[in-house]
Image (cartoon, rainbow, N blue to C red):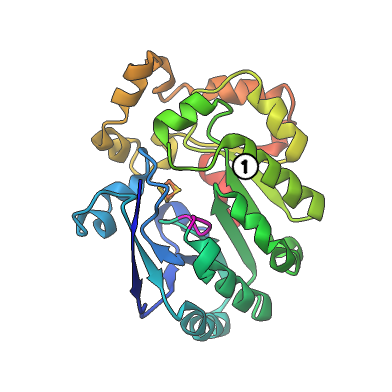
Amino acid sequence: MKAEYLYKQPKTLLNKGTGFLSGYSHSLNPYTGCSFGCSYCYVRQMPVSTFRGLEWGSWVDIKQGAAEIFRKELRKAKVKGPVTIFMSSSTDPYQPIEYKERITRSLLEVIVEEPPDFLFVQTRSPLVARDIDLLLRLGDQVRVSMTVETDLERIRKHFSPSAPPIGARLKTLQALADAGVPTQATIAPMLPSSEALPALLRKCVDRVCVDDYFMGDGSGGKRTRSLGISTLYKQLGLEEWYDPSAYRIVYERLKTVFEEDQIYVSQQGFEP
Ligand code: SF4
């Protein structure tokens, strides 16, 4: 989908960590909107999207001058107490426009100069590897969590056709791990996958998180139900995967190659 881009001058960058992210002092979104436009994205149902009145995925606001505002906020926050940051809760910090705009990179540069206690980077984009130099400077105060909802490209294309291919994400995880950046593979939201998924992940990571719509959308699955996602499962004849117990299928498969203490479920896997 082609997205429309607008430059906006943000007033604030740091938001309080709440709900699913209550383990964090703050969340940080370099953009508003997300051109990956995943069908299951719970942000579709949030005011930021519904007030806009345009299809989710078709617009992105670029937060111009973000780094300087962020620097001031971060300094103030650090005076008040420990600062743990989740980037990002309602956008992908490494969506395609970041190649050109480098807003996320500018925020990371501030983070390296004024390190918070912890930074969690959530993405599904290979572009995160561009910033390995900065991520490494954060030592073990950072974790990059790469979304790998399935190992099956046809499934990925059905649910999130504009998102990066799975193979590229696995290669990126490998590059991050080889460089020494703490990583995690995040099967979230868990989509139908094959028995090969755990072994593919095991080659690149020693920590994995599995989450689904029912535990992980912050509303017991209500938000996802209102998105009509079950239809996408019916189209594939895979309704059995749209079920609160379906995550056990993947969990049991993961246990064949990961130790139990390497497997995190839902919110646990996103904690600082
Ligand atoms: S990448 Fe994340 S924020 Fe962007 S549309 Fe997909 S789920 Fe939503």
Residue drawn at x 67%, y 63% is 131
Secondary structure predominantly adopted by residues drawn in magenta:
loop
Q: Quadrant of the C terminus?
A: bottom right
Quadrant of the rendered image containing residue 169: top right
Q: Quadrant of the N terminus?
A: top left
Quadrant of the rendered image containing residue 34: bottom left
Asked which secondary structure carries label 1, the reply is: helix
Residues rendered magenta in the picture = 92-96
Q: Residue 267 colored magenta?
A: no
The front one of 243 and 135 is 135
Q: Is residue 4 above or below residue 259?
A: below
- 132 left or right, relative to 30: right
Quadrant of the rendered image containing residue 239: top left
Read off the residue under disc 1. 169
- What type is the residue that disc 1 sits on? Arg
x and y percentages locating residue 91 in the rendered image:
43, 56
Q: Is residue 50 above or below residue 152?
A: below
Q: Residue furthest top?
A: 237
- 89 left or right, relative to 140: left
x and y percentages locating residue 42 in the rendered image:
35, 45
